[in-house]
Image (cartoon, grey):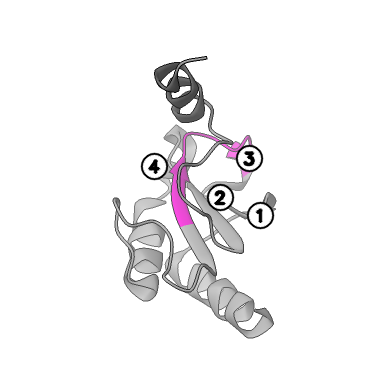
Amino acid sequence: MSTAKIYSVAIFYENFYLEPNGKYVIKICDGTACHVRKSIPILDKLRKELNLSEIRTTTDDLIFTLETVSCPGACGLAPAMTVNDKVYGAMNPKKAIDLLNTLKEDK
């Protein structure tokens, strides 16, 4: 199998990563329901707190990875985020930082 074929499969599927993920993978929903209920300020606050960006998504210590998803299927809980596939709903920037601080304590 060619390298190009392997690469195309790896970048197509959401569960494959080309770089290591953090211990905690945080996914912020940016689907329609979450977006209109202000999911982007949550994303911005977490990026600022973790010193991450759209390009740099994992912390240097490999504790946190932060990314957006189109929809985790929790529209009724908008704005929603997941941490290692556990759903947290009705989020706001303060709640997100509180959760982040809890995770930092548990690391």
Can you give x and y, in whole percent of width and height, for residue 59 in the image? 43, 68
How far apart are the alpha carbons under marks 3 and 2?
7 Å
User: Residue at point 59% right, 36% down?
Assistant: 15
Does residue 47 show up magenta in the picture? Answer: no
Does residue 74 show up magenta in the picture? Answer: yes
Reading the chain from its start, which is encountered first: label 1 or label 4? 4
Reading the chain from its start, which is encountered first: label 3 or label 2? 3
Reading the chain from its start, which is encountered first: label 4 or label 2? 4
Residue 74: which disc? 3
Indicate the amino acid at tag 1: Asn
Q: Pointer 3 and pointer 2: residues touching (CB < 8 Å)?
A: yes
Residue segment shown in magenta: 66-76
Reading the chain from its start, which is encountered first: label 1 or label 3? 3
Q: Height in image: 80 above or below 13?
A: below
**Which residue was labeled with disc 1?**
84
**Which residue was labeled with disc 2?**
80
**Which residue was labeled with disc 4?**
36
Can you give x and y, in whole percent of width and height, for residue 42 in the image? 41, 60
Reading the chain from its start, which is encountered first: label 3 or label 4? 4
Indicate the amino acid at tag 2: Ala
Can you give x and y, in whole percent of width and height, for residue 64 in the image? 51, 65
Can you give x and y, in whole percent of width and height, for residue 53 in the image? 29, 58
Indicate the amino acid at tag 3: Ala
User: Residue at point 63% right, 34% down?
Assistant: 73
